[in-house]
C-alpha cells in the first residue's frame, strides 16, 4: 500500500502494532470453553469485560451488550459503515446506542457472534478492548476540538495518544475500579473534565515559543455519590501529562487497597477522600518525578502529533487521507429562507467553526439510538458535505464538521428527508437517556420510555438540558442536567409504583462545580408535567443571557419544590400509576439488591427524605385549609421517614414504628449528626398520634416536624464517602434557609 493510500484510522493507530487478530482468536477460544462448560461463568466474566462484552437484562446468559470504544468520539465514514453492518447483522435490538462516553453499544448480541463482531471492527481500526471492567475506559475529548473558536490548541491528537498509551497497559486492566479521562480544548470545557478521574484543559505558555500543556484535575466522578475533581497541576507540558497520569494510576493501585474491599467505594475519589488531597498530591508528585525520568514520551509524542492527520475538508478524513472525491462541488437546492423548520435548523443544529465559511452540523438521533441505515446515511453525509469523519458527543448526538456555509440548506434537506429534523417535537431529540432497564441489570426503571414520553408531550424545552438515568449510578448523567431524573420506586397503597428522583440546576461546563440539587421525587406518569411546568416558568421569567443555574440561584429552590409538589399526589385507584410510560405490565422491582449497589442505600434514604419534604410543603397548604387531621398524618409520616433513613444508614433495618423511633432515639439522637436535640421524638410522636385533630396540635406537630426535616435534610448533604455523616456545623447551618 502506497503512502497516499494509508487510511485515517491507520494513521491514528490506537492499537499501536498489536496483533489484534491473534488476540481475538484467543478470546474466541475462551468463549468456546464457556459454551462447552469447561470454564466457570464467573471466570469468563473477567475475560469478556476486558473485551467490552457486558451482561444484559431479560435475556439468557448467551446474550450480551457489546460496547465499542470510539476514542474521543472520532470516527470515519468507513468505520461508520462497518458499525452499520455489525449492527444490522448481530445486534438483536436493531440499533446502536450512542453513549455519554462517546462509545457505541450494540445490544443483545449472541455470544457465539461476539468474536466475529470484534473481527469486523478490527479490520477498520476499531477496538473494544477495555471498554468495560476495572480499566481506563474510553478516553473522551471535546467534540469541538479543532474547530472551536476559543480553543487554545487542538487536543484530539493528545487525547488519542493517551488512548494508545493506556490501551493494554499492564496497570490498566487491574485497577481497583474503572477510570475515566477527558480532554478539553478551551476553558469553556465541552468535555466536562471535572466529572472525571483525570481531566485536562488545554493551556499555553510562552518561553520564546508557544509551549502547549494542560491544567490537570483529579478525583472527579458521578455515580451515586458525585465528586468534582480538584486541580493537581495548573500547567503540565503536554509530554509530561502521560507520566503524570500514570503516576496517578500507580498511586491508585498502591494505596487503593482499602477501596478494593468495597466495590461501591473503589473509585479514586474515595481514596482521595480517605487519605486527604494534600497527601494524595504528595504521593503522586513523588511518583511523577520518578516517571518523568524513567518513561519519557517527548520524542514519540512529537512524531505522533506531527504525523497526525489534521483537518482537511478536501480530503477524506484529515490531512494525509485520500482525496475526498465524493465531496459535492455544486449546490442541489436553492435555499428557502422562509422555511420555518430551516430557521430552527440554523438555530439549533449548526455551530460556526473558527475556520471562516465552515460549520459543524449536529445529527440528533432520539435517545441516541441509530439504526444501520442511519449509520450509513451519516457516513454518506460526512463525505458529501464534510471531511469524511464525525465526532460523537457526550450528549448522544453526532457532529459533522467542515460543512461549507453555502451547503447548509442542502444538508438540512438531507436531514429532513431522512427524518432527522422536523416531524416531531424538538424535545425528543434533546433529552439524554441511558438504556436503563431496557438492558441494564442494575436499573430500576426504563428511562428510554420516559424520555420519549416527555419528548412527545413537551413541545419546547426552552433550551433546558434533561438527563435521565434508570438508577442512581448516573449513566444518563442526571447530576449535570438542568433537570435530572433517576429511577426509583415508591409504595402507593400496598403496591410499588415507578417514580423518579428529581434533581435540578446541574451544570458541568466552564469547570464549574454545579451538581444538580435534589428536590424530591415524582411518579413516572407525571414527570412530563413537571418538565413542562419548569420549562414554561423558565421561559416566562428568565432574564436576557441568564443561564438556568443562575435563574435557580435568583429565584430559589423552593419555587421548584412547589412546582414539583403539584405533581406528586397520586390516586391509588389509578391503574396507570403502577406502570411505566409505554409499558403495559405493572411495575416490578427487578434491579440488583441493596447489597450489590450502594446506590440502593442512598436511593432509600433520599426517597424517605423527599417524602418528608413533600409532606411539609403539602402540610402547609393543609394548614391554610384547616385540614388538621391531614396535617397531623403527614407530619407523623415525616417523623417516621426521617428517623428510618438514618437508622437504615446505621445498618439497622426495622419497619415497626416503635422500633424505628426507639433505634433513632438510642442510636442517632445522641450523635452529632443532627444539629438539634431530638431525644424526645418518640415520646412526642406517640403523644401526637393519640391526640385530637385540633388546630393547636396541628400547629405544634407541624412546627416540630418542619425543623426535624430541615435538620435531616442538611445532615444528608453532609453524607461523606465513607457513608458517615459529618458532624453538625451549628452556626453555619442554623443560618441556612432551605432552598437558598
Image (cartoon, grey):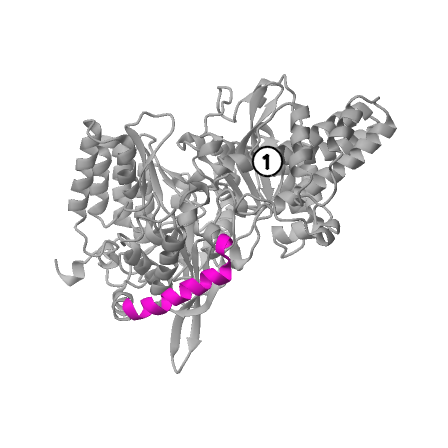
Q: Is residue 408 above or below residue 28?
A: below
Number of disc labels: 1
Along the line of sight, which residue is nearer the eye, 329 or 620? 620
Q: Does the image show residue 296?
A: no
Residue 38, image x and y in percent?
19, 29
Along the line of sight, which residue is nearer the eye, 362 or 646? 646
Residue 248, image x and y in percent?
39, 59
Q: Which residues are magenta?
A: 273-295
Residue 518, image x and y in percent?
61, 42
Along the line of sight, which residue is nearer the eye, 544 or 737? 737
Which residue is at the far bottom?
208
Circle 1 — which element? helix
Name the side, left or right, on which 689 lies relative to 660: right
Query: What residue is shown at x 40% (from left), y 47% (from top)?
Result: 101
Which residue is identified by label 1? 605
Q: Please, what is the dominant secondary structure of the magenta stretch?
A: helix
Which residue is at the far top?
573
Is residue 288 part of the magenta span, yes or no? yes
Query: What residue is shown at x 53% (from left), y 35% (from top)?
Result: 601
Query: What residue is shown at x 28% (from left), y 28% (from top)?
Result: 62
Along the line of sight, which residue is nearer the eye, 121 or 600? 600
Q: Is residue 66 above or below residue 226?
A: above
Is residue 411 part of the magenta span, yes or no? no
Q: Quadrant of the N terminus?
A: bottom left
Residue 229, image x and y in percent?
49, 56
Name the side, left or right, on which 700 lies relative to 396: right
Query: What residue is shown at x 29% (from left), y 60% (from top)?
Result: 318
The local crowd at label 1, few if under 14, some if 14 to 19, many if 20 or more residues have their Cα within 10 Å, is: many
Q: Is residue 531 above or below residue 283?
A: above
Q: Does the image show residue 688?
A: yes
Amino acid at each position: 500500500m502506497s503512502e497516499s493510500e494509508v487510511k485515517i484510522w491507520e494513521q491514528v493507530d490506537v492499537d499501536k502494532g498489536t496483533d489484534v487478530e491473534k488476540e481475538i482468536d484467543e478470546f474466541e477460544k475462551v468463549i468456546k470453553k464457556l459454551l462447552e462448560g469447561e470454564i466457570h461463568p464467573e471466570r469468563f466474566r473477567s475475560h469478556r469485560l476486558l473485551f467490552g462484552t457486558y451482561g444484559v437484562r431479560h435475556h439468557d446468559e448467551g446474550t450480551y451488550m457489546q460496547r465499542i470504544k470510539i476514542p474521543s468520539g472520532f470516527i470515519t465514514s468507513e468505520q461508520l459503515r462497518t458499525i452499520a453492518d455489525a449492527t444490522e447483522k448481530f445486534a438483536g435490538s436493531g440499533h446502536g446506542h450512542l453513549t455519554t462516553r462517546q462509545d457505541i453499544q450494540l445490544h443483545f448480541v449472541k455470544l457465539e457472534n461476539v468474536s466475529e463482531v470484534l473481527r469486523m471492527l478490527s479490520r477498520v481500526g476499531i477496538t473494544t478492548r477495555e471498554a468495560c471492567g476495572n480499566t481506563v475506559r474510553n478516553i473522551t475529548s471535546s467534540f469541538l476540538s479543532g474547530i472551536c473558536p476559543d480553543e487554545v490548541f487542538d487536543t484530539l491528537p493528545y487525547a488519542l495518544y493517551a488512548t494508545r498509551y493506556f490501551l493494554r497497559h499492564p496497570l490498566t486492566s487491574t485497577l481497583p475500579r474503572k477510570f475515566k479521562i477527558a480532554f478539553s480544548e478551551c476553558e469553556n470545557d465541552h468535555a466536562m473534565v471535572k466529572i472525571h478521574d483525570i481531566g485536562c484543559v488545554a493551556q499555553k505558555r510562552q518561553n520564546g515559543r508557544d509551549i502547549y500543556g494542560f491544567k490537570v484535575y483529579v478525583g472527579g466522578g458521578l455515580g451515586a455519590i458525585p465528586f468534582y475533581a480538584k486541580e493537581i497541576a495548573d500547567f503540565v507540558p503536554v509530554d509530561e501529562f502521560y507520566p503524570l497520569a500514570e503516576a496517578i494510576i500507580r498511586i491508585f493501585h498502591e494505596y487503593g487497597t482499602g477501596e478494593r474491599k468495597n466495590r461501591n467505594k473503589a473509585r479514586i475519589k474515595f481514596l482521595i477522600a480517605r487519605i486527604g488531597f494534600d497527601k494524595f498530591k504528595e504521593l503522586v508528585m513523588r511518583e511523577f518525578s520518578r516517571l518523568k525520568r524513567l518513561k519519557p514520551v517527548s520524542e514519540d509524542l512529537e512524531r505522533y502529533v506531527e504525523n497526525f492527520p489534521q483537518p482537511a475538508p478536501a480530503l477524506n478524513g484529515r490531512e494525509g487521507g485520500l482525496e475526498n472525491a465524493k465531496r459535492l462541488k455544486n449546490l442541489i437546492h436553492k435555499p428557502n429562507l422562509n422555511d420555518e423548520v430551516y430557521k430552527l435548523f440554523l438555530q439549533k443544529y449548526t455551530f460556526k467553526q473558527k475556520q471562516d465559511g465552515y460549520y459543524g452540523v449536529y445529527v440528533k438521533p432520539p435517545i441516541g439510538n441509530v439504526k444501520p441505515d442511519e449509520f450509513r446515511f451519516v457516513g454518506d453525509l460526512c463525505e458529501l458535505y464534510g471531511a469524511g469523519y464525525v465526532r460523537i458527543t457526550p450528549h448522544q448526538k453526532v457532529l459533522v464538521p467542515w460543512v461549507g456555509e453555502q451547503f447548509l440548506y442542502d444538508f438540512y434537506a438531507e436531514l429532513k428527508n431522512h427524518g432527522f429534523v422536523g416531524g416531531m417535537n424538538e424535545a425528543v431529540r434533546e433529552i439524554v437517556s441511558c438504556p436503563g432497564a431496557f438492558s441494564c441489570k442494575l436499573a430500576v426503571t426504563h428511562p428510554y420510555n420516559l424520555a420519549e414520553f416527555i419528548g412527545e408531550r413537551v413541545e419546547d424545552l426552552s433550551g433546558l438540558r434533561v438527563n435521565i438515568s434508570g438508577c442512581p449510578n448516573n449513566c444518563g448523567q442526571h447530576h449535570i442536567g438542568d433537570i435530572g431524573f433517576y429511577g426509583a420506586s415508591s409504595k402507593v397503597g400496598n403496591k410499588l409504583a415507578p417514580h423518579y428522583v428529581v434533581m435540578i440546576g446541574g451544570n458541568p461546563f466552564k469547570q464549574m462545580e454545579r451538581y444538580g440539587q435534589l428536590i424530591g421525587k415524582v411518579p413516572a406518569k407525571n414527570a412530563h408535567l413537571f418538565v413542562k411546568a419548569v420549562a414554561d416558568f423558565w421561559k416566562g421569567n428568565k432574564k436576557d443571557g441568564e443561564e438556568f443555574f443562575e435563574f435557580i440561584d435568583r429565584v430559589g429552590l423552593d419555587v421548584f419544590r412547589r412546582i414539583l409538589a403539584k405533581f406528586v399526589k397520586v390516586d391509588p385507584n389509578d391503574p396507570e400509576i403502577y406502570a411505566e410510560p409505554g409499558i403495559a405490565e405493572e411495575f416490578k422491582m427487578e434491579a440488583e439488591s441493596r447489597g450489590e449497589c450502594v446506590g440502593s442505600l442512598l436511593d432509600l434514604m433520599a426517597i424517605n427524605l423527599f417524602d418528608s419534604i413533600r409532606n411539609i410543603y403539602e402540610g402547609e397548604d393543609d394548614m391554610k385549609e384547616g385540614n388538621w387531621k391531614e396535617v397531623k398524618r403527614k407530619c407523623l409520616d415525616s417523623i417516621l421517614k426521617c428517623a428510618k433513613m438514618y437508622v437504615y444508614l446505621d445498618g439497622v433495618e426495622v419497619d415497626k414504628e416503635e422500633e424505628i423511633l426507639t433505634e433513632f432515639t438510642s442510636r442517632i439522637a445522641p450523635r452529632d449528626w443532627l444539629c438539634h436535640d431530638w431525644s424526645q421524638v418518640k415520646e412526642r410522636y406517640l403523644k401526637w398520634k393519640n391526640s385530637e385533630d385540633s388546630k393547636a396540635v396541628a400547629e405544634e406537630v407541624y412546627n416540630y416536624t418542619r425543623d426535624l426535616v430541615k435538620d435531616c435534610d442538611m445532615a444528608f448533604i453532609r453524607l461523606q464517602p465513607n457513608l458517615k455523616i459529618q458532624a453538625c456545623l451549628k452556626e453555619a447551618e442554623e443560618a441556612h434557609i432551605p432552598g437558598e
